[in-house]
Image (tube, helix red, strand yellow):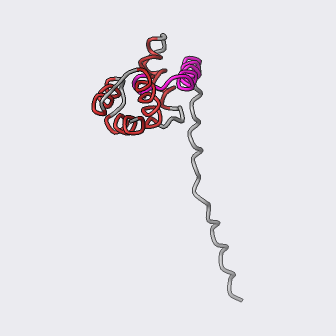
Amino acid sequence: MSPSPAPAAATLAPAVAPAPAQPQSTSGQRNAARSAQQYIDMIAFSRSGLIDQLEFDGFSTDDATYAVDRLNVDWNIQAARSAEQYVEMMSFSLSGLVEQLEFDGFIRPQAEYGANAAY
C-alpha cells in the first residue's frame, strides 16, 4: 500500500488591516461647524468669506476651514444668492457684479455664474 499523500497546507487569507479610525472632531471644530451652518442658512457667503467670518468670530483658521469644508454647499448657488442681494440694493453692470462677487471671495467661475443668474 502506498502512503497517503500529505494533507495540503491550509491556505490562509491575507490579513486585512482594519481601516484607520476617523479622528473625532474637536469641540472647536464642532462649534465652528455649527456657526458655519447658521451663517450659510441666513446669508450668502463665498467659501473664503465664510472662513474669514468664522476667524473674525474667534475660531482658528484650522477649525474654520474644517467647518466650511464639511458643509454641503453649492458655492455657485451662494454666488447667485449674493448677486441677487446686491442687485436688490443697488445697480450693477454685469461685469461690475462679477467683480464685486470676486471681491467677496468667490472664484471667477462662481462669480460669473452668480452674476448671470441674477442679471
Residue in the foreground of this view, choosing between 11 and 74:
74
Would you say residue 40 sits in the magenta stretch?
yes
Point out residue 29 in the picture as x, y percentages from the top left corner. Answer: 54, 21
In front: 20, or 32?
32
* In the rendered image, the vertical position of residue 58 relative to residue 3, given as above or below: above
Residue found at x 36% / y 30%: 106
Residue at the outermost bottom position: 1
**Which image quadrant: the N terminus?**
bottom right
* Dominant secondary structure, magenta: helix
Magenta part of the protein: which range? 26-49
Is 74 drawn above or below residue 102 in the view shown? Answer: below
Q: Quadrant of the C terminus?
A: top left
Tally of numbered discs:
0
**On the rendered structure, is 108 left or right of 48?**
left
Instruction: Please identify the quarter of the rendering in which residue 89 is found.
Output: top left
Is residue 44 magenta-colored? Answer: yes
Picture residue at 59% right of the left edge, 44% below the top? 18
Q: Answer with left or right where residue 63 lies relative to residue 31.
A: left
Above or below: residue 14 compared with residue 107: below
| 11 and 58: which is toward the camera | 58
Residue at x 41% of width, y 22% of height: 49
Q: Position of residue 80 (x, y in %)?
A: 44, 34
Place residue 118 in its image quadrant. Answer: top left
Q: Position of residue 101 (x, y in %)?
A: 35, 28
